[in-house]
Amino acid sequence: MEVASRDKFDAAGLFIDTGKHRMKFGVEDYGAGGKKLVSVHSAPYSDEANGIDVGAGSVRLFVTRNENVFSCYFRTRDGRTAFHRAFYAEGCPDLVRMGFCVQAPFSEGAQGRFAEIAFSDTGMEHSRG
């Protein structure tokens, strides 16, 4: 996915809604600080975690689920899959809503480009090779 931004804090990413919990995992523009991974868990209060600088190009994002735990991963420029953060969603229902989000809190608008979208009930390979 890619984010084309006009101002600081424009972002695009994945969004999960379990009913009581909302989670966002994406890329946010930090102005001169570059574009970085960002994740937010709201239940009902928000807790935000910023990650590494991902540069200007596209970023591959993954979210996995194991019962009440959602784990966020990304693919690095050299092709490795790396862990970003996990969310615990107490009392999570079997079915949740998942989608895409784009935010532009201070600008006239931002664009998110999402490609290679896939859903699978097969677990990921172990990421520690």
Image (tube, helix red, strand yellow):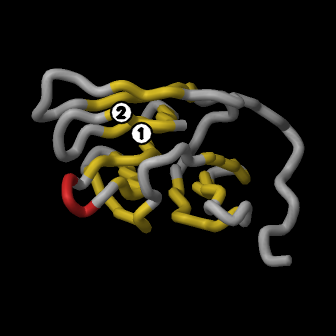
Image location (x, y in percent) of residue 53:
41, 64
- In the picture shown, does residue 84 fall above or below 21? below
Tag of residue 22: 1
Classify mark 2: helix, strand or loop: strand
Query: For the residue marked with disc 1, what is the amino acid?
Result: Arg
Which picture quadrant has residue 72? bottom right
Quarter containing the N terminus: top right
Q: x, y (%) of residue 123?
A: 85, 51
Nearer to us in this view, 125 or 27: 27
Residue 102 disc label: none
Q: Residue at x 62, y 51 (%)?
A: 68
Rounded to the nearest whole Å, what is the CA distance between mark 2 and mark 1?
A: 24 Å
Q: Position of residue 6 (x, y in %)?
A: 21, 33
Q: Quadrant of the C terminus?
A: bottom right
Residue of label 2:
4
Dot 1 falls on a residue whose secondary structure is strand
Q: Amino acid at mark 2?
A: Ala
Q: Earlier in the sequence, mark 2 or mark 1?
A: 2
